[in-house]
Image (spheres, helix red, strand yellow):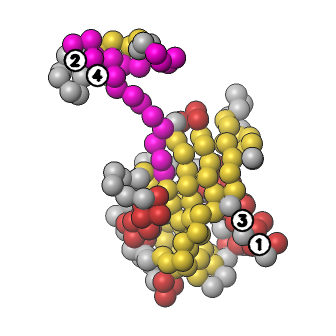
Amino acid sequence: MNYCSSCGARVSLLIPEGDNRHRYVCENCNTIHYQNPKIVTGCIPQWQDRILLCKRAIEPRYGLWTLPAGFMENEETMLQGAARETAEEANAEVKNMQLFCVFSIAHINQVYTMYRGDLVNGLASAGEESLEVALLNENEIPWQQIAFQVIHETLRLYYRDKQQGNFKTHYGDLIKQDNGTYYVNYF
């Protein structure tokens, strides 16, 4: 950040009085520009014994598979955001949504919230951000072509809970290791 969005003056990176982190501060109007994690919300749309995946038509990870998810918008709840993303990416409606997992991903400043929901009438088609959509059984999931580690982990937990016949809410930190692999710390 170079300029204040409030008055247009140059900003400085410093620790404001009473704070403990570097922040961009406008010394002209004294505005402190906080930069906080982004919230991503999405859904596991379920239909009979299958779930809906979307093949990405945008970067990052163009052409790989994911669950419908994206950044929350202002003035919406996480649940509304998950339903909106499902509608945008898969032209699909979901109902009976329940929180399934929350992952903090500190190295990219994101928090993921994923819901389980029932796909209305099993209907879906590719939205603007998807090349295609597919309703898949567990043995059809293209595990090597999943776009994001957090989605891979979400799917792994989903199928584990499904096999045990008991869905619960999961919480954890997805931690990227120096060698590029991930570690999940559940709590």
Q: Does the magenta portion include 23?
A: yes
Magenta stretch bounds: 18-40
Q: CA distance from mark 2 to mark 1?
A: 54 Å
What residue appears at the point 46 percent right and 16 percent down from the top-left corner?
A: 18
Residue 10, image x, y percentages: 24, 14
| Residue 73 vertical placement versus 179 (above, below) | below
Residue 121, image x, y percentages: 49, 88
Q: Which residue is mark 4?
A: 31
Q: Secondary structure at mark 4?
A: loop
Q: Which residue is mark 2?
A: 29
Q: Which residue is mark 1?
A: 166
**Which of 183 and 35 lies nearest the eye of the viewer?**
35
| Residue 14 vertical placement versus 128 (above, below) | above
Mark linked to residue 47: none
Observer able to see residue 147: no
Answer with left or right where residue 80 lies relative to residue 109: left
Q: CA distance from mark 2 to mark 3?
A: 48 Å
Q: Secondary structure at mark 1?
A: loop
Quadrant of residue 101 within the rendered picture = bottom right
What residue appears at the point 78 percent right and 66 percent down from the top-left corner?
A: 160
Q: Which residue is mark 3?
A: 168
Q: Is there a contact, CB below 8 Å, between mark 3 and mark 1?
A: yes
